[in-house]
């Protein structure tokens, strides 16, 4: 049976999942509005509409969205809401910028609101989302490539997990999903080891560096790359406060070449999901791993870990000489773009066949995020 048919068979075999995200506060409110007309807000809207809950408005700070309709719901400004009777209107914050929005509402003397955690939205609202529908069409269109990825995986555990992951991504049925029994970045075969030289792409505030240091008793050297000014500042504070000696911090993103790009960020606020774009409010440096390795004359690279918001493939392309010279272990996230699930494994498999890598898959949350490809060169 081909992979596509196996996925469909697994979906049919699972119990039907008819759950909605509907806590008691939402259930008991006659009038609700969603603050945030982006993807998280739209997922929440689809969820509530499926549950027959009427939504009065989307609220959004983007003036370009005002007076447009999304999911059949008008998008308005907060000022519009403040100018009407709002005492019985429950506002549901659905945005990665929920901290800023919370302060905005409190400053406007609005207290009748709740915050929907993006992770919770990703778990409970995914099956009603446009993201799931797009993935279902994508899977049907690219089923041969998914089949190829499935068959390149090394062990039955990875193949079973990949099968269940894709069944979940296609159907949205949480019963399909399996989670790895090992911690993220601690695959039993593809894991950091003592004395490793590690490229940490997506250093955030030092969380992965802390994890690796704890795992290895700080017997390694980590080159941690983080483009966001505020995230980088927080990481530097951790290093200085703890007297960390084995982490080199680089305020840069990773890509195919050295350049400058932009990201959208909020001054003074750390965010694990700052996305690099062509136009934004913070200019950031992008560096190729090959250029960094050459510039700093690194004598070895044993592990490359990448969680860089959709730039993973570009970063691998910018690490070609490093991979050719050192054949490092690879830990790369596959969930930021739907295409990454097939494009990254197939790129790496085809590009480095002569290195005889073995490939594994891990999945580390009960939603569609945190899928990781683990790869290691076969021992001679």
Image (cartoon, grey):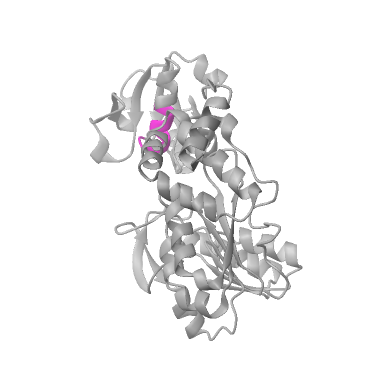
Q: Residue furthest right?
A: 217
Query: Residue 329: percent from the left, percent from the top?
Result: 60, 68
Q: Is residue 87 visible?
A: no
| Horizontal side of residue 116 vs 221, given as left or right | left
Q: Nearer the viewer, residue 37 or 174?
A: 174
Q: Please, what is the dominant secondary structure of the magenta stretch?
A: helix
Q: Nearer the viewer, residue 190 or 122?
A: 190
Query: Residue 66: percent from the left, percent from the top?
Result: 25, 34
Q: Is residue 112 part of the magenta span, yes or no? A: no
In the image, is residue 241 above or below residue 120? below
In the image, is residue 321 above or below residue 150? below
| Horizontal side of residue 354 vs 140, given as left or right | right
In the image, is residue 103 above or below residue 314? above
Q: Nearer the viewer, residue 114 or 295?
A: 295
* Quarter the C terminus occupies: bottom right
Q: Residue at x 56, y 69 (%)?
A: 356
Image: magenta residue range: 37-45
Q: Residue furthest front?
A: 1
Residue 267 found in image quarter? bottom left
Q: Residue at x 53, y 86 (%)?
A: 297
Q: Is residue 288 visible?
A: yes
Q: Is residue 41 part of the magenta span, yes or no? A: yes
In the image, is residue 103 above or below residue 273? above
How many numbered marks have been drawn onto this rendered protein structure?
A: 0
Q: Residue at x 35, y 35 (%)?
A: 37
Residue 93 found in image quarter? top left
């Amino acid at each position: 049976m081909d992979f596509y048919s196996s996925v469909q068979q697994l979906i049919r075999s699972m119990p039907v999942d008819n759950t909605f995200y509907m806590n008691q506060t939402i259930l008991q409110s006659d009038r609700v509005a969603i603050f945030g007309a982006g993807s998280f807000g739209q997922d929440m809207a689809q969820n509530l509409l499926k549950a027959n809950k009427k939504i009065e408005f989307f609220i959004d700070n983007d003036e370009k969205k005002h007076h447009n309709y999304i999911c059949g719901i008008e998008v308005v400004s907060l000022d519009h809401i403040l100018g009407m009777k709002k005492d019985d209107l429950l506002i549901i914050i659905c945005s990665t910028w929920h901290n800023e929005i919370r302060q905005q509402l409190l400053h406007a003397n609005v207290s009748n609101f709740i915050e929907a955690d993006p992770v919770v939205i990703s778990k409970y609202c995914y099956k009603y989302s446009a993201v799931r529908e797009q993935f279902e069409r994508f899977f049907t269109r690219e089923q041969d490539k998914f089949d190829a990825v499935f068959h390149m995986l090394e062990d039955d555990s990875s193949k079973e997990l990949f099968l269940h992951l894709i069944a979940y991504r296609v159907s949205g049925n949480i019963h399909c999903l399996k989670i790895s029994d090992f911690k993220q970045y601690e695959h039993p075969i593809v894991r950091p080891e003592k004395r490793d030289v590690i490229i940490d792409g997506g250093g955030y505030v030092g969380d992965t560096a802390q994890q690796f240091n704890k795992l290895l008793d700080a017997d390694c050297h980590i080159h941690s790359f983080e483009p966001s000014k505020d995230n980088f500042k927080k990481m530097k504070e951790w290093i200085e406060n703890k007297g960390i000696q084995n982490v080199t911090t680089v305020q840069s993103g990773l890509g195919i070449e050295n350049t400058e790009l932009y990201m959208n960020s909020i001054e003074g606020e750390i965010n694990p999901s700052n996305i690099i774009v062509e136009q934004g409010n913070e200019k950031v440096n992008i560096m190729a791993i090959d250029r960094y390795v050459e510039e700093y004359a690194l004598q070895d690279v044993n592990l490359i870990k990448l969680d860089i918001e959709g730039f993973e493939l570009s970063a691998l392309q910018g690490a070609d000489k490093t991979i050719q010279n050192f054949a490092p272990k690879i830990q790369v996230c596959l969930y930021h773009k739907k295409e990454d699930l097939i494009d990254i494994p197939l790129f790496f498999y085809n590009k480095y066949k002569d290195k005889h890598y073995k490939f594994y898959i891990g999945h580390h949350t009960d939603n569609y995020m945190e899928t990781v490809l683990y790869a290691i060169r076969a021992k001679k």
